[in-house]
Image (spheres, grey):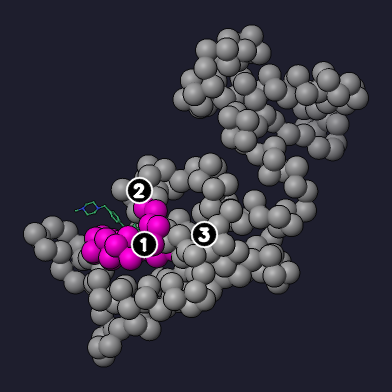
């Protein structure tokens, strides 16, 4: 997969080259290119924003600069691409989104700042046949799109073949079966007078699987009842029985 990120703060994306993702890039499982939006300005001040039509707080990112940047970035290399634009007004980015995007050849992320990007940039891209996804990583307000891109790139890249050491991890993700994962334990058996649950040390795999499912149901019911509702009434009954 090829990932391009356009931003006025390229250094914000440096974490993509660390640890697991950095190793995936080094191994050629992933290609990441970060572009400075200001490279497409032509004035001495390298202006990327201007006042909003209709008034209102803050500034809006200028369409001309974004248009030239996306013309170039989307054209090289010429791969079918999905343009992703993080925004507080976007559709929710979920694990299902990450799975869908993991099948893409290329993702191009446009990181806005200020109060966002002039709407005509997205209209123009769609008019030219580019798939444009406006997405939000959660119901809180950030200062720009870069942090959201870090989140989304990590969520997508970990699903790519070979990136995770143990492919079962992605298959057994939270949300993969619609539930939150339950508690995890490792050595020592007792720590600060707190013992590992006996069932996990007993070697009865069926009992362990049942215990883990029950803890997942219980945790989901307590923390994310919305996920349980989505699974239907049987799941809620099972969660009540699991407690
Ligand atoms: C008058 N109006 C003008 C607009 N504001 C709304 C607003 C618009 C942008 C910003 C800052 N910002 C700029 C680009 C950008 C990208 C993503 C995100 C983002 N925040 N939270 C998420 N889950 C995000 C994601 N993903 C924030 C961004 C802040 C507040 C209301 C009042």
User: Where ligand 1 lies, by quadrant?
Assistant: bottom left
Disc sitting over residue 129 in the figure:
1
Furthest residue toward bottom: 44
Q: Quadrant of residue 116?
A: bottom left
Q: Secondary structure at mark 3?
A: helix
Residue, disc 2: 90
Numbered range of the magenta stretch: 109-134
Relative height, residue 77 to residue 132 (above, below): below
Q: Is mark 1 within 8 Å of ligand 1?
A: no
Quote the CA–CA distance across marks 2 and 1: 20 Å
The residue drawn where x is 82% and y is 18% is 207
Apparent side of residue 142 relative to residue 183 in the rendered image (left or right) = left
Q: Is mark 2 within 8 Å of ligand 1?
A: yes
Which marked residue is nearer to the observer: mark 1 or mark 3? 1
Apparent side of residue 53 relative to residue 32 in the rendered image (left or right) = left
Residue 74, given in percent of the width and then of the height, sits at: 43, 72
Q: Quadrant of residue 9?
A: bottom left
């Amino acid at each position: 997969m090829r990932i391009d990120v356009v931003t006025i703060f390229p250094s914000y994306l440096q974490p993509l080259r660390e640890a697991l993702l950095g190793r995936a890039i080094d191994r050629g499982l992933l290609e990441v290119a970060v572009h400075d939006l200001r490279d497409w300005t032509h004035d001495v001040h390298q202006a990327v924003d201007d006042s909003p039509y209709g008034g209102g707080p803050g500034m809006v990112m200028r369409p001309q600069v974004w248009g030239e940047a996306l013309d170039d970035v989307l054209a090289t290399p010429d791969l079918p691409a999905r343009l992703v634009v993080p925004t507080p007004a976007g559709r929710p980015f979920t694990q299902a989104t990450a799975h869908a995007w993991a099948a893409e050849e290329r993702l191009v992320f446009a990181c806005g700042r200020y109060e966002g990007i002039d709407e005509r940039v997205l209209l123009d891209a769609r008019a030219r046949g580019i798939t444009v996804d406006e997405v939000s990583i959660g119901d809180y307000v950030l200062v720009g799109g870069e942090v959201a891109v870090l989140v989304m790139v990590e969520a997508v890249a970990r699903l790519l073949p070979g990136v995770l050491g143990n492919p079962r991890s992605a298959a057994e993700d939270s949300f993969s079966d619609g539930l939150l994962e339950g508690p995890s334990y490792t050595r020592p058996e007792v720590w600060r007078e707190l013992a590992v649950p006996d069932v996990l040390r007993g070697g009865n795999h069926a009992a362990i699987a049942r215990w883990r499912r029950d803890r997942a149901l219980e945790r989901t019911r307590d923390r994310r009842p919305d996920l349980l509702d989505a699974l239907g009434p049987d799941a809620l009954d099972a969660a009540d029985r699991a407690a």
